[in-house]
Amino acid sequence: MAHEAIVLASASPRRHALLREAGLAFDVLAANVDESLDGAPEPEAAAAELAQRKAAAVRESLGDGAQGRWLIGADTIVAVPASQGWLLLGKAADSREAAGMLRSLSGTTHRVVTGVCVLGIAAGGRATAHAATETTAVTMRELTAEEIDAYVASGEWRDKAGGYAIQESADRFVTELTGGGFDNVVGLPVALTLELLESAGAPLPLRGGQR
Ligand SMILES: Cc1cn([C@H]2C[C@H](O)[C@@H](COP(=O)(O)OP(=O)(O)OP(=O)(O)O)O2)c(=O)[nH]c1=O
């Protein structure tokens, strides 16, 4: 089987779809990394670190097969302002945790941060990282206990940071998005990812007749 030069280090079907819609050909290889973080990092630092870990894990698993390729890692974190710093929310482990996350997000403007790391691997194996984060401020109206119960029962929270999916029915809870894009909330800021690939020298399809 032919290998693509670009590898998306992700098991997220949303990330696959967003990058495909950008017209890119790429391989997919899931990265299993330890997502624990030391201390109380800022949301952007946390997302950047986990994106880097994912790209690095795929580099490791490809071995020499990573040479001459561009590996993309991404991580999305939901961050709620807390009394001291931020409460960082990843994916809920169960429905109880999902309900707790939705209670903490109800009536807030929180951040959804996606870190993206592109590792360009030269023919000799040397890696160069191009990385950035995008932040979208999401305002969620107050949710009633009944709404939270019904949403959790729907199962839509599974595998979503913060326990909600804006691209599915949770859009009805969201009143405003500012800063970053909708795609950033869904898991991959596409324009930013293309910029990082471009600056890393990856082969990209023609875009807007400009290249
Ligand atoms: C806030 C939000 C997150 N999400 C998703 C995007 C990500 O898939 C997920 C955040 O978890 P991540 O740990 O960033 O990613 P993942 O485990 O799904 O995939 P991988 O590590 O293999 O790349 O939450 C939505 O789909 N909709 C939303 O509204």
Image (cartoon, grey):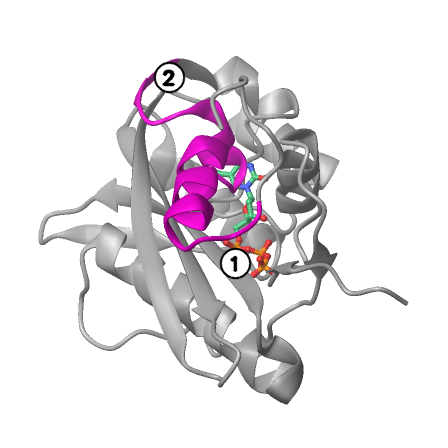
Name the residue type under label 1: Ile
The residue singled out by tag 1 in the image is: 72
Q: Secondary structure at mark 1?
A: strand
Where residue 54 appears, as percent x and y from the top left, is 50, 69
Q: What's the residue at 19%, 63% (across, down)?
A: 41
**2 left or right of 60 in image:** right
**79 left or right of 211 in image:** left
Quadrant in the rendering for residue 23 = top right
Quadrant in the rendering for residue 200 = bottom left
Which part of the image, by quadrant, shows the N terminus? bottom right
Q: What's the residue at 58%, 77% (across, down)?
A: 67
The residue singled out by tag 2 in the image is: 141
- The range drawn in magenta is 176-203
Q: Nearer the viewer, residue 68 or 188?
A: 68
Q: Is mark 2 within 8 Å of ligand 1?
A: no
Name the residue type under label 2: Arg
Crowding near the residue tagged with mark 1, few <14, some 14–19, many ≥20 C-alpha atoms within 10 Å: many
59 lies above or below 17: below
Crowding near the residue tagged with mark 2, few <14, some 14–19, many ≥20 C-alpha atoms within 10 Å: some
Where residue 76 appears, as percent x and y from the top left, is 44, 49
Q: Nearer the viewer, residue 90 or 29?
A: 29
